[in-house]
Amino acid sequence: MSTKINSMRGGFLGRAFAVFGAAAHASAAVEAGRKPAKRDLVTLGIDPNAFERM
């Protein structure tokens, strides 16, 4: 049972926290007039090269 809980925590919850954190970092960077970190864009499923062309 603990393996299933650890799997869910590491998988679903870990991914959810990563996505929310990346979204917060990327939006703060854009609001400040800076480019978001490539790592945050990749976490959000955005191609960093495509973002730079905008």
Image (cartoon, grey):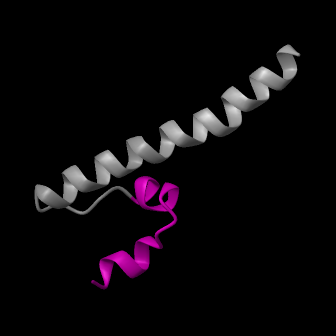
Quadrant location of residue 48? bottom left
Q: Residue 49: where, in percent of width, then height?
A: 42, 78
Magenta residues, dominant SS class? helix
In the visual, does 17 lie left or right of 26?
right
Viewport quadrant of the N terminus: top right
Residue at figure coordinates x 60%, y 33% from the top left: 13
Q: Residue 51: where, in percent of width, then height?
A: 35, 76
In the visual, does 27 lie left or right of 11?
left
Residue at figure coordinates x 77%, y 21% from the top left: 5
* Foreground residue among 43 and 8: 8
Q: Residue furthest bottom?
A: 53
In reply to whether residue 40 is colored magenta, the answer given is: yes
Viewport quadrant of the C terminus: bottom left
Q: Residue furthest left?
A: 32
Q: Residue furthest front?
A: 1
Q: Is residue 17 above or below residue 28?
A: above
Quadrant location of residue 36? bottom left
In reply to whether residue 43 is colored magenta, the answer given is: yes
For the record, the magenta segment spans 38-54
Q: Is residue 47 above or below residue 45?
A: below
Residue at figure coordinates x 49%, y 36% from the top left: 17
Q: Residue 3: where, in percent of width, then height?
A: 86, 20
